[in-house]
Amino acid sequence: MIIKDVLCPFCGCLCDDLAVEVEDNKVVDVKHACKIGASKIMGHDRIKAPMMRDDKNGEFREVSYDEAINESAKILANSKRPLLYGWASGLCEMMAKGILLNEEVGGIIDNTASVCHGPSVLGVHEKGLPTGTLGQFANRADLVVFWGCNPVQAHPRHMSRYSVFNKGFFASKGRRSRKVVVFDVRKTDTAEMADEYVQVNPGEDYIVMSALRAIIADKADVVPDSVGGVPKEKLVELAEAMKSAKFGIVYFGMGLTQSRGKYKNIDNAVSLITELNAHGKHSIIPMRGHYNVGGFGQVCAWTTGYAGAVDMSRGIPYYNPGETCSNDLLMREEIDAAFVIAGDAGAHFPAQSIARMSKVPVIQVDPFHNPTTEMANIVIPTKVSGVELEGTAYRMDCVSLRMRKLVDVDFPSDEEVLDKIIAKVQEIKGASS
Amino acid sequence: MQTITLVPKEQFKISVEAETITPDNFAGKSADEIGALVAFEGNAPRPLSELFDIKVNGSADAADDVKIEINGNVNRVKRIGEAMTAGLIMINGDVDMRCGAKMKGGTITIKGNADSWVGQEMTGGEINVQGDANYYVGAGYRGEACGMRGGKITVFGNANDFVGEHMCGGEIVIKGNAGIMPGVSNKGGKIVIEGDTDMPGSEMTKGTIIVKGTVKDLMPVYQREGIEAVDGVEFTKYVGDVVVDGTGELFVK
Amino acid sequence: MSEMVIKNATVYDPINNINGDMMDIAVKDGKIVDSVSGSAQTIDAGGRLVYPGGVDAHTHIAGSKVNVGRIMRPDDSRLNNKPRTKVTRPRTGYTVPNVYSMGYGYAEMGYTTAFEAAVPILKARHTHEELEEIPIIDKGGLTLFGSNWMVMDAIRENDLDRLAAYVAWGLLSSRGWGVKIVNPGGGEAWGFGKNVSGLDDPVPNFEVTPRQIVRQLAEANEKLNLPHSIHLHCNNLGKPGNYETTLATFDVCKDIKSKRDRQSLHVTHVQFNAWGGNHWGDFESKAEPIADYLNKNDFLTIDMGQLVFGSATTMTADGPVQYANARLLKARWSNGDVELEDSSGVTPLEYHPQSYIHGIMWAIGLELALLTKDPWQVLMTTDHPNGGPYVNYPMVMTMLMSKKRREEEMAKIAEKTFERTSIAGIDKELDWYDIAIKTRATHAKVLGIVEHGKGHLGVGADADIAIYDIKPDETDATIEYNKVEAAFRYAAYTIKGGEIVVKDGEITATPKGKTFWVKSTAPADGHERMMEDLKMKFKKYYSVSMANYMVQDEYVEHPYVVETGYQ
């Protein structure tokens, strides 16, 4: 049986044109997806049953779901500063439950954006975000800029589906309808195929953007001969290309969010785009990593008023990245229990944060083994969202779509596990009040 | 004069939010009454008496006659002095984030280091940090147009990034070095950095920044005006940020 | 079988011509009934004011734009914070409240129904995800059609049946209630940073004019016999001198006839479109000619879009206007183009009484309401949160009821305002009945939901009832406006579907409301031509598959579906 129009549960592209062949309740083939997406859908070794251990260096013993859930609830209910982290590989429906659980336990809920596009959100607080849906750029853009991102590697089908090779209503020649420019500290694979590659000194994207803004504002005379490794003549040329574009789009990634200045790089990029709108039409969009990291930001925002890093210890949502993000707290050794679900802290957190997590109870909810499993005390396996479970996800451009269920498995969903933990926490807290 | 001495009973790991520690809240209260005020260690309410040894000498009718002395490291106690209007807080140790946030008056002296957001959204009063300060000295809250509007912050050591971000008024003096982007998005106020810094005054529309040390990267958006003396010392004067039609003044030694 | 009776209610129910009669209201199984048994739960209203539950026909409460506002504004989310209670979740936000505060805030004021003013079809799923989380109130959404490629192509080819078929399909896809048009054609022009300058300025690349878009969508709307008329945000919003466009736009639908007992055109937040002058320097109110037009023509209704001084977050599908605002005020700006469909923009603003521009805007909203003779023609709104947050409705209500209250506000406003508006000379003061019309009865009538139980207290209506702590016969609203505002701000009782959800201003229950949407059918051949065009557009231009596009049933947990056929 071939299931068409399947959505890929891997990256922020959220490609929805996949065709998956299912035989005897097993995925046997995936068409149209990139290698990484196909691999996720094909599936691999998974955690077979819930397990627990007191000593993180010891062996896990298999336990029942009830035991794992009850113990998790006990740990969380009795913590003073629990962290509920991850969320991005799950579905929106379970994220809402996670936020409720965080409310119940008075902890901090944070998602993978913390180590990824969190700074983009901080840039939005400063300047907003002039953007649109991916089809808008696909149909109209004649100037395509990749700044600090490498879609050839990180978002393999992006350039054929949305940004470079595809034909659009106003871009009938496909690739030839667009000029592609890459700004990066090194010549990436994406830079190799671009029309132009601009090398920026590491950590100096910010001043390059400011210089461009000055030139565009007709104040080129204050700009020095070279900024951030880019000669002034080149900056003037680039500014001219941007000004004369009919529709310019900037796609950006970790090259900006994780380099010197972090959110100020996004802040400045947004201002550059805003100012360019006096000349043509310009937009900007972050290349989100996980397929549903955007979904967490949306659900958290409508539920609490903030896109992530929400501290509920005082009973009212408090948000202050730099103070309430996962690593802010872990590096200060504040967290006394960690709940990691649909996200891999072990793989992405700095050593100091890992060190803290090694000292406190860690509960992991995930279908698969990953570095977080190495530090876990309780492991609860669940369905693979978007393959074994249907529900909502938000693409990188904030369009929400419904993921499909392709096969049946005998594991609970994230949401079911969260519901049970919430009920148990309420019971424990109710008993003590 | 009422003097209250607080000695932390333990070295807190999980941060304690103690916005109740202000001269305004303590004025005229006995040690028991002060002890009954509640702080939060993570999500757990804890009376101050559990967290500190509390001694009270003398009495006061109002905050301006109150002195609070904290003897010990409170590097995990946040929001001390929040919104205070008068009086004195002396911290003989390090202090955690948001010390003196929304301060309206009075004085806070920190003998050790101050963590991020010291003097956040301050409108008056004075804060002295004898050690180092972390990020966002005298800055604002995410999305707000203004950070510090009045008052004075002096850091005798070094400060981290974003000193005086979104400043609208007041004065900040950093005797040591400052991190990147001091005075970013400023609309007023004065920042003096006696040591080194990097990318000062980006998107400043109004205000004054004086740098006595070296600037690693000058923002490429400033109009050089020439040499000008400030308090008898010669600086190169720049005006900008030109992109935002700024008339801010940047003096670099 | 739950029964309730409200005794000694001073009832204003304009749909049923009840004007301050003292009566009992009987409720059974969530509906108003003739009478109930002796064992019914009794509430003694004690002669206090009783209105049908409030209905808001135009407000931005759910979906992509609202969430963009929240994400952009932690400075707003940190306001109006309340911790959870046994019954309520934590609340945040003033201009962009979180979903819980959104529902509780309306219920506290005695409102029980609110319609999201602008739903982009591609992002309708998001709208419904938020609507589902908003507690208590019943809701619906108005779907955007005014800059849509399918719409414009059908209009260019003069294919009304195909257009109607797309409208029907679009409403189904978005689970929408009605046809929303914002700056017709402008959303497409904005795709390349341009705008349309008026009704006859053709949309670049599509060769149709805004006039054609408005006209043909109105015709399609009536062919489909939709419960609501087209709901229109005019071209040139926010530009001095735009009142001429507004009047010309009214004329476009002058001869559109509906089979239903309602307007053929609803024009929204007209305050922003009733501007005279040529630039900010000679900017003035043109509420008078607009009101004049309304006084002479009964085929249309409008809503105020009243300004409230203080913080606002503007959010509209009028992309060009939002960009212009942001540049003018050097404010934060979020833009959200929706491929093939429309645009949007979100910008935080502050309205200052000392700005005479804002003063004039403030006056215009009130002038529109007070100069128009028929109270049913002008709905009270603030275009939340564009003119101001909905929690200010009670204040606006008192300004309509009391000249003295207006004068109190005027004392704070820049003098120049009064040279440019006639508000100071308006003595009219609306009464309890008029206010009941403007805050519930006419909203329900204009939306076409009266027959579905909203906006009135007749037998068969939903038992959505608001009891306010005020005795209308003993209260002079022209003087005791502070008391009136306090009473409207926190209801003594709000009853939703027969359940007490608010008592003495506190939320007591949080049932889930229902979502109104329309399922209509168009002629088969028109539908076929439409589908052919649609499939091609999905294949070539949309970035999502057609199979994944439509809102699925899972997103509307309590649907209330009205079916209509082609006329």
Image: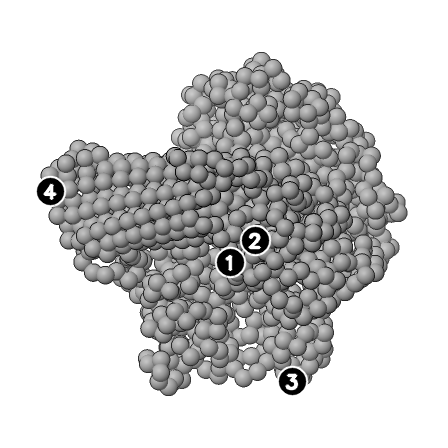
Check if mark 3's residue and mark 2's residue have beta carbons within 8 Å: no
Check if mark 2's residue and mark 4's residue have beta carbons within 8 Å: no
Q: Residues within 10 Å of mark 2 (few under 14, many from 20)?
A: many
Which mark is on residue A260? 1
Q: Amino acid at mark 2?
A: Tyr
Q: Secondary structure at mark 1?
A: loop
Check if mark 3's residue and mark 1's residue have beta carbons within 8 Å: no
Q: CA distance from mark 4 to mark 1?
A: 49 Å
Q: Write the residue at 27% across / 43% down.
A: B108
Q: CA distance from mark 1 to mark 2?
A: 8 Å
Looking at the image, which is closer to me, B153 or C442?
B153
Q: Residues within 10 Å of mark 3 (few under 14, many from 20)?
A: few
Instruction: Let me know if marks 3 and 1 both belong to one chain.
Output: yes
Tag 3, which chain? A
Q: Which residue is mark 4?
A: B57
Q: CA distance from mark 2 to mark 4?
A: 54 Å
Q: CA distance from mark 3 to mark 2?
A: 54 Å
Q: Which residue is mark 3?
A: A24
Check if mark 3's residue and mark 4's residue have beta carbons within 8 Å: no
Q: Amino acid at mark 1?
A: Arg
Q: Write the residue at 44% across / 55% down.
A: A321
Left or right: where A392 falls relative to C179: left
Above or below: residue C18 compared with residue A266: above
Q: Position of residue A115 (x, y in %)?
A: 49, 64
Above or below: residue A139 compared with residue A18: above
Check if mark 1's residue and mark 2's residue have beta carbons within 8 Å: yes
Which mark's residue is nearer the viewer, 3 or 4? 4
Q: Write the residue at 49% across / 80% down.
A: A369
Looking at the image, which is closer to me, C532 or C80?
C80
Instruction: Let me know if marks 2 and 4 both belong to one chain.
Output: no
Give the mark nearest the N terminus, 3 or 1. 3
Q: Position of residue C8 (x, y in %)?
A: 43, 31
